[in-house]
Amino acid sequence: MSKIGISIILPTLNEEDNLSLIIPEIISKFDLNNLIYEIVVVDDNSLDNTEKIMNEFVTKNQNIKFIKRESNPSLPLSIYEGIENSKMDYVMWLDADGSMPVDDMLELVIKQKNNLNDVIIGSRFIEGGGYKGVKDLSKNKLIQAIKSVRDSNDSVLGMIFSIMFNKVLNYLMKVNVKDLTSGFVIGKKLYFPKEIFKDAEYGEYFIYLVKHMMKHKIRMIEVGYICETRIHGDSKTASNILQLIKRGIPYLKVAYKLRKN
């Protein structure tokens, strides 16, 4: 397999406890697999001890970079700022809450090494994927998923929102990507210009990304993974139905606009 350098981008907001666990695991497993990498944490003005913890990591490890954003909070622009400040030819980004396991990061890297010119997407909605410890949501496993989430710090509504919205988005978009709210990606740095992120409010940037790849005839390959419940802290998606609706409207607007065009 090809030897590639990867910048791992972790956008954060109040994730000090999760970073303390995830970063050492990434370092351990990526070093064990002899991978060339850096970790870029882009913080959206956290109110916890993220900055203190990250400064300690940076002091100890030259492969870690910490960026504290000064502008308005924005998940999409946090990701782009990480891309912009990365030094490797390939970039990977994912949530910093532990829901996207390090072993699955390695699976995406392996897939990328075998498909150097493609974009690899971690997917909950293809074979091998699942949500909150449930591998097959198509076979009446939703109740199991809800029970799993209820015992964690995640939002049951957020899980259901993600499942239902992907069905709606796939109906509207008619594309060959099943997980249209993924946020778990690896690809060439040059594939991800600012235009993908600049007009998005939250996770709907991913729809712009998919359309951009299609427009430029860049193949996207989904790799199934089991999305775990977050380790520490509260979900950033939403905590009640009104917030979920508000969060979901931009997705629908973008999907409808791109379908119309």
Image: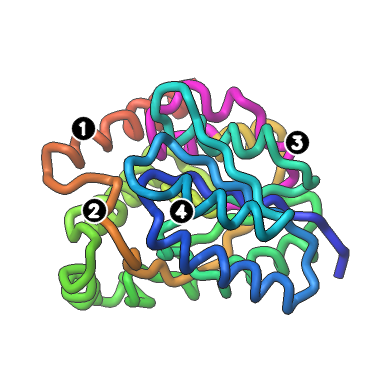
User: Residue at horizontal 56%, vertical 40%?
Assistant: 210
- Tell me the amino acid under the disc marked 1: Lys
Image position of 59 (left or right of 233):
right
Q: Label 3: few (<14), some or many (≥20) within 10 Å? A: few
Q: Position of residue 151 (x, y in %)?
A: 18, 73
Image quadrant where one finds the N terminus: bottom right
Q: Tell which circle, 2 or 3, labels the residue nearer the N-terminal end.
A: 2
Residue where numbered disc 3 is placed:
190
Disc 3 + disc 1, Cβ < 8 Å: no
- Compared to residue 225, the image places residue 178 above or below, namely above
Residue 158's disc is 2
**Mark found first going from the N terminus, 2 or 1:** 2
**Type of amino acid under label 4:** Asp
Q: How is the image coloured?
A: rainbow
The CA distance from mark 2 to mark 3 is 32 Å
Label of residue 95 in the image: 4
Q: Nearer the viewer, mark 4 or mark 1?
A: 4
Q: CA distance from mark 3 to mark 4?
A: 21 Å
Q: CA distance from mark 4 to mark 1?
A: 21 Å
The quarter of the displayed image where residue 260 is located: top left
